[in-house]
Amino acid sequence: MRKRLGWDLVFDVSDYQDIINIVYIGLLGIEKDISEEYEESFYQSYKKELLLYESYKKVEEVILWQLERYKIEALLLLDTEASEMYPKPEMSHISQIEFLVDKKDLPLIHRLMLEMDYEQKEELLNSGIVYVRVPGVRIVFYDKMPVENKAVRRYFAGPVRRHRRLEPYKYIHILTNEDAYLYRVARLVELYITGKLKIRDIMDLWQFKKLLGEKFRWRAVKELLMKAEWQEFISQVELLAVLWFGEDVEEQYGLALELEEYILSRGRENKHLDEALLPCEKVRLDFYWRNRDKEWTLRKQAWLFPSREYMVQFFPVLEKYPFLLVFCWIARNTRFARRICVNKCRRIGFRIQIRLSDMKEKLKGMMGRDKIEEMPVDLPEDVARTEEKTEESAGGEPAEDTTNLDETEGEKKVEEFEDQN
């Protein structure tokens, strides 16, 4: 197992896909086959997940108490109850807690969050206000439902207070099972469009669907999904979930396998999949990819032309002569270009050596085969004559019959024995 699996790749994929705790639990039975380095890494990440889960539970209680104290109407979109969907709480993963509040309450919420030692984080593709705090807790407040689809947004329209209250609070509200399912589907759509859809998101929806009973209004939900034109998307998501976590079914996995590749490749663009799953979201998908290309361009520029504060670490002369920054950029990029060229030449040379050695071995094999075919085939009589000639040349005379010698010696011994008697 240690030779077959690259544990660094397993750890990296598990960490990115937010399933490292489940992978660790699954690996407990074969821990002897894991290298000590990665066994410790898995354990530390698993332990971090447990501590983070406890932190989220405490944080949720404090924030709910603060919102109730200041009479702020809030709707819980995502909470810590996700742990109840799994057989064991430690198998769950809480990425963030989400609230829907009125826009007029945002200034007061901002002050409360700063007082509780939270820091506001700016995110380009997030429509809400994100607050973070050690050891990795994320709280997001929205002033409108984070769904762009018109049919689904119209369904969720209305004041927060229209939703049912969470006992024993007066100002905290929660979604019904149908609304919670629809919101989870809408969240998956948004994650897919922004290239952030992960295995954990598919698993959460799969576990949540397993908890829904017969009283769940599937007909009303499916009608809304048809209005939103999400039926193909959710169909392939559920098919992929069955392929991963359920039993095999006799269905075509074509689009589901493309969706799997999209998730495992961390959101690599696939226009065919976009048009098949979400044809109504084409404009938003194109806008996202253009926006993402622009972001990558800015990152490349920042890498090629870093700030003077960064360059001073490698070129101390910039402290006295800042105007030399352009020349330092040229020197730095020239070094990188030289290294890249050397590495490419080494790779090309190595490949050429491998091909030459393969050709050499093939030529040797062909020449050896030709020699074998050219050698004459000896008949049995010729072989016997050759052996006789070899024996004569080696001893000078043909070999004696050792059988007759042995019989003669035996007769002499018998006669000697009779004479003695």
Image: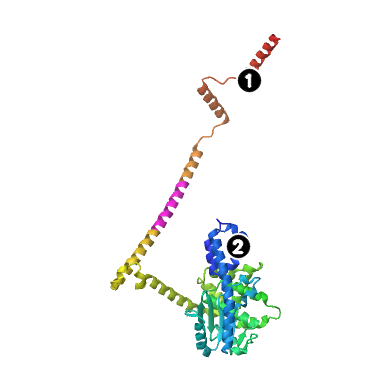
Quadrant placement of the C terminus: top right
Residue holding disc 1: 403
Q: Whole-percent x and y of residue 360? A: 44, 47
What secondary structure do most residues of the magenta stretch adopt? Answer: helix
- For marks 2 and 1, the one nearer the N-term is 2
| SS class, disc 2 | helix
Magenta stretch holds residue 348: yes
Q: Quadrant of residue 170?
A: bottom right
Q: Nearer the viewer, residue 103 or 394?
A: 103
| SS class, disc 1 | helix
Q: Whole-percent x and y of residue 69? A: 58, 88
Q: Whole-percent x and y of residue 253? A: 61, 68
Answer above or below: position of 18 versus 361: below
Residue kind at label 1, given as amino acid type: Thr
Q: Which residues are magenta?
A: 344-362
Q: Whole-percent x and y of residue 47? A: 57, 68
In front: label 2 or label 1: 2
Give the number of the disc on residue 188: none
Residue holding disc 2: 27
Answer above or below: position of 2 versus 221: above
Q: Quadrant of residue 30?
A: bottom right
Q: Nearer the viewer, residue 34 or 232?
A: 34
Q: Residues within 10 Å of mark 1 (few under 14, many from 20)?
A: few
254 left or right of 339 in image: right
The answer for how far apart the CA atoms under marks 2 and 1 are is 74 Å
Answer above or below: position of 30 versus 53: above
Residue kind at label 2, given as amino acid type: Leu
Q: Residues within 10 Å of mark 2 (few under 14, many from 20)?
A: some
Question: What residue is rendered at 60% in x and 76% in y?
Answer: 234
Quadrant placement of the N terminus: bottom right
